Amino acid sequence: MTDYLTVNRANWDERAPAHAASADYGYEKFLADPTHLSGVVTFDRPLLGDVSGARGVHLQCHIGTDTLSLSRLGARMTGLDFSAPALEIARRLAAETGAGIDYRESDVYSAADVLGAGEFDLVYTGIGALCWLPDIARWGQVVGKLLRPGGRLFIRDMHPMLGTLDETQPMITPRYPYFEQAEPLVFDEPGTYVDTDVAFENNRTHEWNHGLGEIVTSLLDAGLTLTRLVEHDSVPWNALPGFMTLNEATEEWRLTEDPRRLAASFTIEAVKTRRK
């Protein structure tokens, strides 16, 4: 487990250019249209509400398309990620679109040391973020440290129910742990979640699932008050190939047959109400 950052960073470093080149991330759309927003932030917007003027940090920001989208909604954004190649792309996109976004290189657990404690009105983190972190309680403490009193967390991520499922079988079956465990789930899979012809060399990842109760408890223990918990039947990528259908209007994937059977993602909002 000690080398999870090294293993996962190599995977993300190699994939960042392919993600930027893929139509799925819409890099060229951001350049062509100053009002364009990512599909993820567009989905989040009704629950996210007004962020204009808020000082925000996007944890695990990757190549910065969601960070830029929040900036376009009026937030004063900082982006943080552990991948230097991803941040290089994020900085280039910000420069090419005239966005004043401060990008910092760091793993999540060091975020408060790098950015300072109590500096932010909004901590935003999103789809496919928590599964890369071994300790959800420690993540909650980081969120609590970053927020000023009255500041809020907004997260939408993969539902841990979806994280238990093995999509390689003829019938979808629960295979992986729902609850956090010390040892990582080790995967060695080629390719990535966008359309690309690139053949990658760094295919191993270390990942963890975290139960919904564990996620909520980590925030309560960090001095936050839960203000919203919504479960959704969709995610922004084809998480179960062969079993999901894309809704073109929302850019979200749902089970093709009776999507009510699966909680695929969740949204949590929480406000920092006390010091920790």
Image: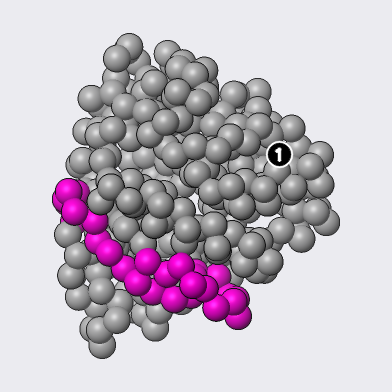
Side of 34 where 11 appears, left or right = left
In front here: 237 or 249?
Answer: 237
SS at circle 1: helix
Q: Which residue is drawn at 25% across and 34% down?
A: 137
Residue depicted at 67% across the width and 43% down the height: 68
Identify the residue at horizontal 40%, vertical 79% (top origin): 241
Q: Is residue 47 above or below residue 161?
A: above
Give the quadrant of residue 28: bottom right
Q: Give the range drawn in magenta.
A: 178-204
The relative height of residue 238 versus residue 75 in the rendered view (above or below) is: below
Q: Residue furthest bottom?
A: 170
Residue 51 in percent (x, y) is at 60, 30
Mark 1 belongs to which amino acid?
Answer: Arg
- Give the position of the C terminus as an image quadrant: top left
Q: Is 26 positioned to the left or the right of 258 in the image?
A: right
Q: In this view, does 25 lie to the left or right of 164?
A: right
**Which residue is under mark 1?**
72
